[in-house]
Amino acid sequence: MSTVRITDGAERAVIENLLDRNREALIETARGLSDADARRRLVASLTTPISLLKHAAAAERIWFQRFWAGLDESECDGYSNRDEGTFVVADDESLADVIAEFERASRRSRTIAARFDLDDTKDNPREGTVSMRWTLLAMIEEFARHAGHGDILREQIDQPLSRQPNP
């Protein structure tokens, strides 16, 4: 994905650009890994490069398809009852499949978000009244945090401890 970099100008363009940059940064943490490396568990949790992408696709569906568009689960692409905060990836899902799933969900999120003004609001049972601006900013935060997790995992995968210099 080649994203035009917008660093000034209209607020919405800047927000959407930052979100797209963080989406791409998250994908880049896993791009080029083998499926085995993408599934390597290097921390106690289920956090792996592939599971971060799976979780991000679920976040896109939950916030944009389910919450903002009001779609039923059956209308959401790739939705499953695993979406509710899980990092579980099915055995038959490849890294390429999960990247494609996240990219599809992101495209659909862009389309849904475009139907709303930044100041449009909806009531959320957990967060209270939230605006589209808040949602976009929350996704920026979410994906930036997970891209950071992915960077650390990628560093561990690319240079195992046995090859790292001693301090």
Image: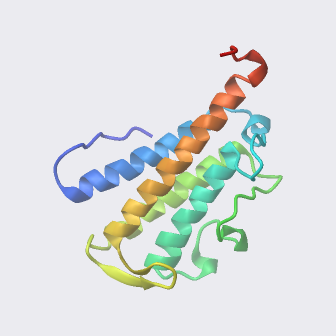
Q: Quadrant of residue 72?
A: bottom right
Q: Please report the residue visible at 80 percent of the width from the left and 37 percent of the height from the top.
A: 36
What is the residue that sits farthest to the right in this orientation?
A: 91
**Which quadrant holds the N terminus?**
top left
Q: Quadrant of the C terminus?
A: top right
> Which residue is most to the left?
9
Residue 5 percent coordinates (x, y): 29, 39
In the image: residue 98, left or right of residue 161: left
Q: Residue at x 74, y 24 (%)?
A: 160
Residue name at image x 39 percent, y 52 percent: 19
Please count the marks in the image.
0
Coordinates of residue 71 in the picture (x, y in percent): 52, 80
In the picture shown, does residue 153 fall above or below 111?
Answer: above
Residue 41, image quadrant = top right
Q: Nearer the viewer, residue 118 or 4?
A: 118
Q: Position of residue 122 (x, y in %)?
A: 38, 83
Q: Position of residue 163 (x, y in %)?
A: 74, 16
Question: Which of the two residues, 167 or 136, is positioned nearer the viewer here?
Answer: 167
Q: Relative to residue 37, is residue 57 depicted above or below? A: below
For residue 41, above or below residue 156 = below
Q: Identify the residue at image location x=62%, y=79%.
A: 73
Look at the picture and state if 120 lies above or below 79. below
Splitting the image into 4 quarters, where does residue 136 fall?
bottom left
83 relative position to 16: left or right: right
Looking at the image, what colour scheme do you see? Answer: rainbow
